[in-house]
Image (cartoon, helix red, strand yellow):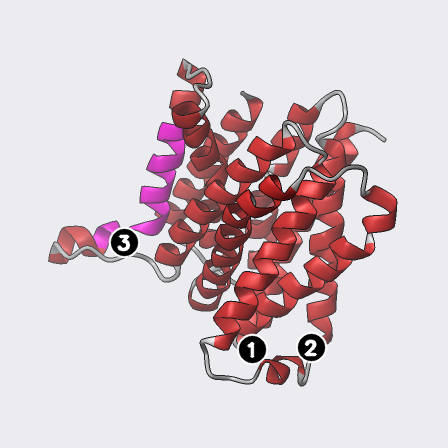
Amino acid sequence: MSPIIYGLSGMVGIGVLNILVSLLNRNEDSFKIGFLIQLGNALATLALFPFLYKENPGITVFFLLTIAGITGALAFVFINKAFKEGKASINSPIISTWGMITAVFGFIFLNEDFYLSKGISILLIVLGIFLSSIDIKTLLKSKSFKLIAGVKWSVLAALNLGISFFTMTYFAADNHWYSVSLFTRFWTIITYFVMAGTTHKPILTYFKNLPLLLFFAIFVDVTSFLMMNIGYTTAEPGVVSVITSASPALTIVLSFLILKEKISKQQLFGVVVVISGIILLALN
């Protein structure tokens, strides 16, 4: 199958998932939605064990991937909070900047090359986040710093996703991607169970009155994640990354058509700048 098809699967999957999560968070508790989607992902990943498992990376890798699992769980908690409080069209591009954070970690910890185009892409992303997340009119009039709704959660989500994916990428370089994904999913759902236990709310209550849209969200997430990972094993993984990185553009279109969201010209320009930076970074 063509790398373009895998990339489109990732782009459409992430773009649609953002809208589904936004819709689910309108009438449901954000933590409940995150918990159930991640549980569904973990069970689906485990179900693929007989077909995709090829090696055991060892107990050391298993425990070190707790970093990826914990930060992945925290990221999804923040993603749900962002979509609960703010607009998908604004928060989706900001969350997608996790790729920039992963690149920065690679430069710092793995001594990866840092060249002009990478620097420009990072500057574009930072500028785009500023334009799309800061209410400049309020800042100039009242001189008070005010973030647009949901943005603080999006930034935290991007940071944690950056750490999670950097850790997964680090171990996937020497181990089969499915084993890394399986171990990460395990620690993610363990983290969610621990957090659920601190809410003093019986876990079984999360399984009552499940919306049908939730099962569709799980299916979309698992399918797109699988297609993306298979795409990264092809001869052109860069093509997959570039196309997938354009997912916020689809989210913006769908948020306008389905969620009836409206954004200002300044925010729209900021979103375009962020997406441009993400695509440029993926091209690198």
Q: Mark 2 points at which residue?
A: 211
Nearer to us in this view, 18 or 170: 170
Q: Can residue 248 be seen in this view?
A: yes
The stretch drawn in magenta includes residue 126: yes
Q: Distance between the residues labelled 3 and 1?
A: 28 Å
Q: Residues within 10 Å of mark 1 (few under 14, many from 20)?
A: few
Sequence-earlier tag: 2 or 3: 3
Q: In which quarter of the image is residue 284?
A: top right
Nearer to us in this view, 114 or 47: 47
Residue depicted at 66% across the width and 54% down the height:
16
C-beta proximity under 8 Å, tags 1 and 2:
yes
Q: Considering only vertical position in the picture, is 86 above or below 174? A: below
Q: How far apart are marks 2 and 3 (CA)?
A: 35 Å
Q: Distance between the residues labelled 1 and 2?
A: 9 Å
For label 2, the SS is loop
Q: Mark 3 points at which residue?
A: 135
Please name the amino acid that badge 1 sits on: Glu
Residue depicted at 45% across the width and 34% down the height:
100
For label 1, the SS is loop
Apparent side of residue 247 relative to residue 31 in the rendered image (left or right): right
Which span of residues is magenta-colored? 122-137
Q: Mark 1 points at which residue?
A: 28
